[in-house]
Image (spheres, helix red, strand yellow):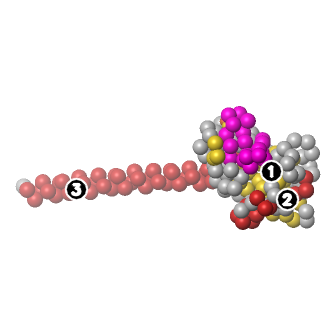
Amino acid sequence: MNDRKEEETMHAVDTRRRLLLKATGASVAGCCALQAGAAAADEAQGVMKGDLLVAAKGDAATPLKAEDIKAGAKPVLAWPYDLGQKAARSDSRLNKLLLIRMDPAEMSDEMKQRSAGGVLAYSSICTHQACDVTEYVAADKLLMCFCHFSKFNPGDGSVAKGPATKSLPFVPLTEKDGLLVVAGGFSNKPGV
Ligand code: FES
């Protein structure tokens, strides 16, 4: 009787374990499918290595050169430009970039590596509530969003002053034939 009871208990435990494993497996598969879908969506919309840049306002057909971004001037908002599709990647606001020129003497080695001719690129979407980050405050050497005055360090995109709490992503640039070219994706996910 005792043996039978023990056998029944073991069977129940085994059944429960198998059910648990099945449920966990299904959940992991669902999670991975979702992550893969999100990654694919990011890839479809994101900034891509090799993209050129075009102004978000005005002439959207002429690729930007490093010399178009002036020191001390208002930052330039730009879209990545898909050379294959011959179109700006403007279908998602999250792709919009902010371009500034900084004196290389004020840049770290890491910033110099990701800049092209002194030009640096960041997501223009504030990580607080998604307003456009439009300003570079030269006196503070900080990027600023006018909506609630969050400030970001151009060195690594970190928050210098809230209410934003998440770093502003940056995008590495390079130059080819005098044109600004995207050299890689966002340093972290753009947006809120
Ligand atoms: S949306 Fe930029 S500070 Fe609030």
Q: Residue furthest top?
A: 147
Residue identified by numbered label 2? 180
Residue 172 is drawn in which quadrant? bottom right
The reply to whether residue 113 is visible in this rendering is yes
Amino acid type of the residue that numbered disc 1 sits on in the rendered structure: Leu
Give the number of the mark in front: 2 or 3.
Answer: 2
Q: Is residue 139 magenta?
A: yes
Residue at image coords 72%, 66%: 109
- Would you say 114 lies left or right of 180 here? left
Q: Position of residue 79 (x, y in %)?
A: 81, 48
> Which label number is shown at residue 187?
none
Residue identified by numbered label 3? 11
CB atoms of marks 1 and 2 within 8 Å? yes
Amino acid type of the residue that numbered disc 3 sits on in the rendered structure: His
Tell which circle, 1 or 3, labels the residue nearer the N-terminal end: 3
Q: Position of residue 184 (x, y in %)?
A: 73, 61
Q: Confirm or reject: label 2 Cβ below 8 Å from ligand 1.
A: no
Q: Quadrant of the N terminus?
A: bottom left
